[in-house]
Amino acid sequence: MSQNYPLFVRRDFDGFFGLFVDNLVQLLLVPVLCGALCGMTGDDARYVYDYMIPGAAVSILLGNLFYAWQAHRLAVRTGSNSVCALPYGINTPSLLVYIAFVMAPVYQQTKSPGAAWQMGLYACLGSGVIEFLGAFVAGWIRRKTPRAALLSTLAGISIGFIAMTFALQIFHRPLVGMLPLAVLLIALFARWPFPLGLPGGLIALLLGSLCGWLLPASLSGVNLSVANVATAWSQRGLHLPIFCGEQIQAVFQLPPAQWLGFLSVIVPMGLFNVVGSLQNIESAAASGDDFATGPSLAANGLGTISAALFGSCFPTTIYIGHPGWKALGARAGYSSLNGLAITLICLTGTLPLIASLIPVEAGMAIVFWVGIIITAQAFQASDSRHAPAVAMGLFPAIAAWGATIVEGAFRTSGGQTLSQVLLANPSTDANGFLVHGLISMERGSIFTCMILAAISAFLIDRKFYSAAIWSGLAVLFTTLGLMHAFQVEGNSINYLFNLTIPFLQSPPAAPEGVYYYRAFTVALGYLLAAGAFAWCGWHQSRHPVAEGSGH
């Protein structure tokens, strides 16, 4: 009975290790990227360890405790003991984008790590406000969107940026990563019981760490040493959160030209976070846990706002992966454990110590498995007739993965830059795949996945007018630059927004050496498709045809 819904179950530890590793990876990225791109090294590393990491702890703790409480409430309401809390943590895409396209440009211009940090706070606050406001309309969006459209987007992200990413790392460090993977597959696919009832995730993590310590670095590829542990131990210390309202207010006192322009990054990322969280809530519903949309998204937005107010530049979000954690047997306890453990690490300065003891490769198999489960769920939880729609929605996400690979390859090639190649010939291909088309399909892929899958699902159901409406939405998003439009400068791919271009006015030309693609022809293509769908709807209303007749 729901009255017996426990605070913790044994399998919560499996879920905890997976979610904890995921959160830990994000935290480990912060000092590395902020040091390399924003000058936060030496004395200026205080912006990371005195402000950002403790601020992240506030948001992660509040969010995880809320979603654990929400799971208990749902268990009481439904009488189910199998309710699994929504996973939650730092939003990885926002972390990467805000460092690269908000904080780093400010640092390059001012040479001030403090100025870069303050602009990051502003970006995080803006994202949180958008996420919070999105809570009031997301329920309507969820009701009007086919499940195949929401789940196929997650499946594409799972393939390209979760399962594939960690699969490549596992096979790159096989002596540390493959034994944990084997143990996890035995525990979760074969459901093999381990001695003393120990969770498979814990055994996998311990064995992977053991391999990293026992094998020489030349074989394992992991550099673990007692000296590194001793150095990390000496860096511990209490770091309590600090309220940063004055620092955020200082940004708005700057000339508007110095901060308004970053809305072109903040607004799309905020919208992406709303849609992504919405898709994850639908994923949980497909697994049997139908959480209320509004409160879930509102808590998400408030978590991001609290992160900014206490010094973190990085939005938090409802994570992809609920089906995987539920399949592990996790309930609400894994969320509470994650919030408490991450907070303890952030406030005690022991993040470097954790990194010196446990190789990240030891826990990658858990996240890899979650990606597999999410991909499978997209097909299993959708109407079987909509399986082609799910498949259709995968392509933009796969293109996003491919574009990421192409961009990285050009960055390390030492030859022509990506912008030079496209300026010379937009039809350039790489092994038969058009580079231009790859990038165009990748831009705004979270929207493109959902729209293409929704159109396909409505066409399968012969709801032609609905398909036309979604195609019209694609026209709008593409015209604004939220989908398909892009600019390439050197080897950096970025969005090209048309929000400030008056209707029918000639857009400004690209600067020297920068490749612009505004995607107006793609918008016209969507418009033609909308017309075709609308015509079919009109014809069907006048001449009803039995399904499957082919006439």
Image: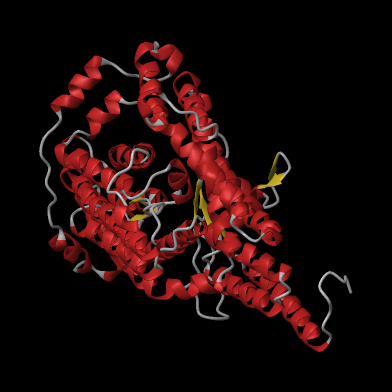
Q: Is residue 348 above or below residue 79?
A: above
| 139 horizontally vs 225: left or right | right
The answer to whether 25 is drawn above or below residue 235 in the figure is below
Position of the C terminus by quadrant: bottom right
> Of 159 and 485, which appears nearest the observer?
159
- Tell me where residue 288 appears, x and y as whole percent: 48, 58
Q: How many marks?
A: 0
Quarter of the view holding residue 79: bottom left
Residue in the picture at 76% in, 76% down: 532
The image position of residue 142, as x and y in percent, is 50, 70
Residue beneath the point at 57% across and 63% down = 147
Question: Of residues 3 and 462, which is closer to you in this image?
Answer: 3
Looking at the rendered image, the quarter that the N terminus falls into is bottom left
Determine the residue located farthest toward the bottom in the rendered image: 542
Q: Residue furthest front?
A: 1
Q: Is residue 534 above or below residue 1?
A: below
Estimate the x, y position of residue 369 in percent, counting from the top left: 50, 38
Q: Which colour scheme is used?
A: secondary structure
Front position in the image: 311 or 119: 311
Q: Residue at x 60, y 57 (%)?
A: 440
Residue at 55% from the left image edge and 57% from the top image edge: 151
> Can residue 513 be seen by looking at this rendering?
no
Q: Is residue 383 above or below residue 320?
A: below
Give coordinates of residue 437: x percent, y percent.
66, 54
Q: In this view, does 52 lie to the left or right of 461?
A: left
> Is residue 452 visible to us here?
yes
Q: Which of 33 and 544 is in front in this view?
A: 544
